[in-house]
Image (cartoon, rainbow, N blue to C red):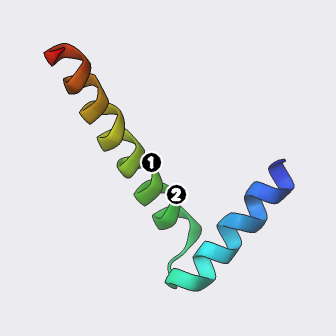
């Protein structure tokens, strides 16, 4: 699974023309935003 994840990261890196550190941080920030959004929905319910 880790080899597949590294391969996917490499493919995304080539597609978006950014290095893997920038790509990982972009993915991480998007995941955090989604988690915070879900948390706010749960608090409102």
Q: Residue at x 25, y 18 (%)?
A: 42
In-front residue for pair 16/43: 43
Which residue occupies the foreground of this view, 29 or 34?
34
Query: Crowding near pointer 2: few (<14 within 10 Å), some, many (20+)?
Result: some
Relative to 42, 34 lies left or right:
right
Residue at the image point whose x is 52% and y is 85% from the top: 17
Q: CA distance from mark 1 to mark 2?
A: 6 Å
| Badge 1 density bin: few <14, some 14–19, many ≥20, Cα 10 Å | few
Q: Residue furthest front?
A: 45
Please, is residue 2 above or below residue 39 in the view?
A: below
Disc 1, disc 2: CB below 8 Å? yes
Residue 39, numbered circle: none
Q: How far across and how far down the image is residue 44, in percent?
A: 14, 17
Instruction: Give the vertical position of 33 relative to 21 (above or below).
Output: above
Which secondary structure, mark 1?
A: helix
Can you tell which quarter of the image residue 25 is in?
bottom left
Identify the secondary structure beneath mark 2: helix
Judging by the rendered image, the residue that carries numbered circle 1 is: 28
Quarter of the image for residue 38 reads top left
Q: Which of the 4 quarters of the picture holds residue 19?
A: bottom right
Q: Position of residue 45 (x, y in %)?
A: 18, 14
Task: Name the residue that disc number 2 marks.
Answer: 24
22 sits left or right of 14 in the view: left
Question: Horizontal and vertical percent for residue 16?
Answer: 50, 81
Is 9 situated left or right of 42 in this image?
right
Q: Residue at x 46, y 66 (%)?
A: 22
């Amino acid at each position: 699974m880790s080899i597949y994840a590294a391969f996917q990261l490499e493919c995304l890196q080539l597609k978006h023309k950014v290095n893997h550190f920038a790509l990982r941080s972009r993915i991480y920030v998007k995941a955090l935003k989604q988690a915070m959004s879900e948390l706010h929905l749960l608090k409102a319910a």
